[in-house]
Image: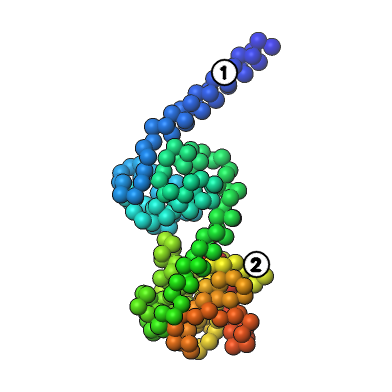
Amino acid sequence: MQLVKIIFFTTLCVFLFQLNSAFASENNMPVLRQGDAGDSVYMLQAELKKRGFYQYEVDGNFGSGTKRAVIEFQQANGLEDDGIVGLRTWHILRNATGIGEVSRGNGDRKLGQRLAGFAQRFLGVPYVWGGASPGGFDCSGFVYYVYSQYGVSLPRVADEQYHFGQRVPLADIQPGDLVFYSTYIPGPSHVGIYVGNGQFIHASSGANAVTMTPMSKDYYQTRFLGAFRVFR
């Protein structure tokens, strides 16, 4: 009986020591914000990347991509989304509490919705063959540009983008998902972004501009190849 008590006490002491060490380590972590650099930023980026929030190179520089990733992480975990990494953000990020894993699905949906909303800012921008900037887009250039603003580096052309994400059934499609069509040549030759309510936004050569189109439109419905999710 005495031996059991000793083992229990020893185990408890080890646990409390580890817990105190963890919190002490977190308390010693610096508050990080855009413009900072160094080993702490490198650690931050590595943790965010491991959890799927950061897509850039881990370089130790807290730039706009890192801030966006921090905001997405904070939103997914019910934190104040100010893009500043304080004690609470460090604690959830560095300790596998499960909060981020539980909330990640909702975070992905919200991220897709924001991306779809951002894409609609470019309605009416002229269609330009080979264009990938707000001065003019082709279909894949439009998708490439919009996703790049959220830290995702897609391939540049539609047939390569087609192999990038994870296929989702049409019944499960969500805003932000990519939708592909076989149009002027066989295979994935046209791409757009689903925005909800049965519509997708795309740079259309027929409309000569970025436009929104119902997926139920006969021309596209008969040429639909599939939907793919990049945020997962």
How far apart in space, not on screen, are marks 1 and 2 (Cα)? 51 Å
Give amino acid for label 2: Asp
**Image disc number at residue 10:** 1
Callout 1 secondary element:
helix
Callout 2 secondary element:
helix
Which residue is tagged 2?
Answer: 172
Residue 223 seen from this side: no
- Residue depicted at x 47% and y 71%: 119
Please state if 199 lies on the left or on the right of 207 as rendered. right
What kind of colouring is applied to the model shown?
rainbow
The one nearer the camera, 27 or 81, is 81
Give amino acid for label 1: Thr
Please state if 156 lies on the left or on the right of 15 as rendered. left
Figure label count: 2
The picture places residue 116, in percent across and down from the top left corner, at 51, 68
Residue 165 against residue 12 in the figure, above or below: below
The one nearer the camera, 165 or 6, is 165
Residue 115 against residue 14 in the figure, above or below: below
The picture places residue 65, in percent across and down from the top left corner, at 38, 56
The picture places residue 42, in percent across and down from the top left corner, at 36, 46
Residue neighbourhood size for the residue with mark 1, other residues' Cα within 10 Å, grouped as few (<14), some (14–19), many (≥20):
few
- Residue depicted at x 34% and y 50%: 34
Residue neighbourhood size for the residue with mark 2, other residues' Cα within 10 Å, grouped as few (<14), some (14–19), many (≥20):
few
- Residue depicted at x 64% and y 72%: 170
Image quarter of residue 132: bottom left
The picture places residue 41, in percent across and down from the top left corner, at 36, 45
**Image disc number at residue 88:** none
Q: Quadrant of the C terminus?
A: bottom right
Q: Earlier in the sequence, mark 1 or mark 2?
A: 1
